[in-house]
Image (tube, helix red, strand yellow):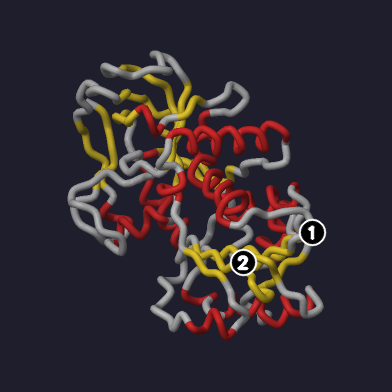
Amino acid sequence: MTRAIRIHQTGGPEVLQMEEVTVPAPKRGQVKIRHHAIGLNFIEIYFRKGAYPAELPFIPGNEGAGEVIAIGAGVEGFKIGDRVAYAALPGSYSEERLVEAKYLVKLPKYISYETGAAMMLKGLTAQYLLRRTYRVKAGDTILVHAAAGGVGLILCQWAKALGATVIGTVGSPEKAKLAKKAGAKHVILYNEENFVERVNQITKGKKCDVVYDGVGKSTFPGSLDCLRMLGTFVSFGSASGQIDAFNIGILQQKGSLFATRPTLFHYIAKREDLEAMAKDLFKVVKSGDVVIPIHARYALADVAEAHRALESRATTGAAVLIP
């Protein structure tokens, strides 16, 4: 038996219940891992509330890092004792779990379990946003909403290392300092300033090549007004609520814009893509271009407290659960 957090009905943080569960032996293609650290992400709040459907009861969580403790038939490339990490696989709020080996990557020795758990979902998200959805290059000007959040801080660091000028929006002076330290050249306090007007002023009317928007409803359609002609709007989250259906003609009216709503799971669906993306992520972490900021640690049993902090936007950077 092992312990896990299960949700039997959707609702507030109180529905997160610690229970004893049985994790069977791994089947063909699977490995069993013992978590040393588990990532905490805003998407788990959507599942807890029922905004995203899941069959009840379920174990929430989407990323983790730990060691291989059992291997199923047909698994190649892994052995018992290997340090591993993964992302975008529901069911991580647990001490032990089964994982399809094809979704695991080996964690380099220079990356701790806590950093590995904190970086996979957010770091791989930043990788595909910056290198695949829109390939940021030196000289680009980009806008990052929620620049002091988990993904935001990674985007700021990585984009700066790529030679881009980063404009970030944040909700407080404290968060503005974090975004600046991470590489945002300009920071906009969205509660005090009109971010569309400020972007126009900062860029002297040239606007941005790409907007990375993990906020959603409250920043749309303003984000479109921050883009140059033929610019790219990337919606990758909805912390303020989902973007309502809109007339696609607005993209033409505002400069033949591109708009996309990507998700990590599609970008890592092919094993070779996952390995290449993880290699790219580990490289920038090793070089120091990207530092994964872990600003909070919670015991797995205190996950309700962790959710309250995350939901109130009291957190910055990454938070992890320790089994």
- The mark nearer the N terminus, 1 or 2, is 1
Q: How many marks?
A: 2
Quarter of the image for residue 94 reads: top left
Rendered location of residue 207, percent (x, y): 72, 74
Which quadrant of the figure contains the N terminus? top left
Quarter of the image for residue 282 reads: top right
Foreground of the two, 119 or 265: 265
Whether residue 63 is visible here, answered yes or no, is no
Which amino acid lies under the numbered mark 2 shown in the image of this protein?
Val
Which residue is drawn at the image coordinates 53% and 44% (left, top)?
A: 124
Rendered location of residue 321, percent (x, y): 44, 40
In what element is the residue under mark 1? loop
Whether residue 39 is visible here, answered yes or no, is yes
Is residue 290 left or right of 132 when viewed as pictured?
A: right
Crowding around mark 2 (Cα neighbors within 10 Å: few <14, some 14 to 19, many 20+) is many
User: In this rendering, is residue 278 above or below 302?
Assistant: above
Is residue 112 left or right of 47 when viewed as pictured?
A: right
Crowding around mark 1 (Cα neighbors within 10 Å: few <14, some 14 to 19, many 20+) is few
Residue assigned mark 1? 139
Please identify the residue farthest to the top as the structure is shown: 80
User: In this rendering, is residue 142 above or below 80?
Assistant: below
User: In this rendering, is residue 289 above or below 194?
Assistant: above
Residue assigned mark 2? 211
Foreground of the two, 285 or 322: 285
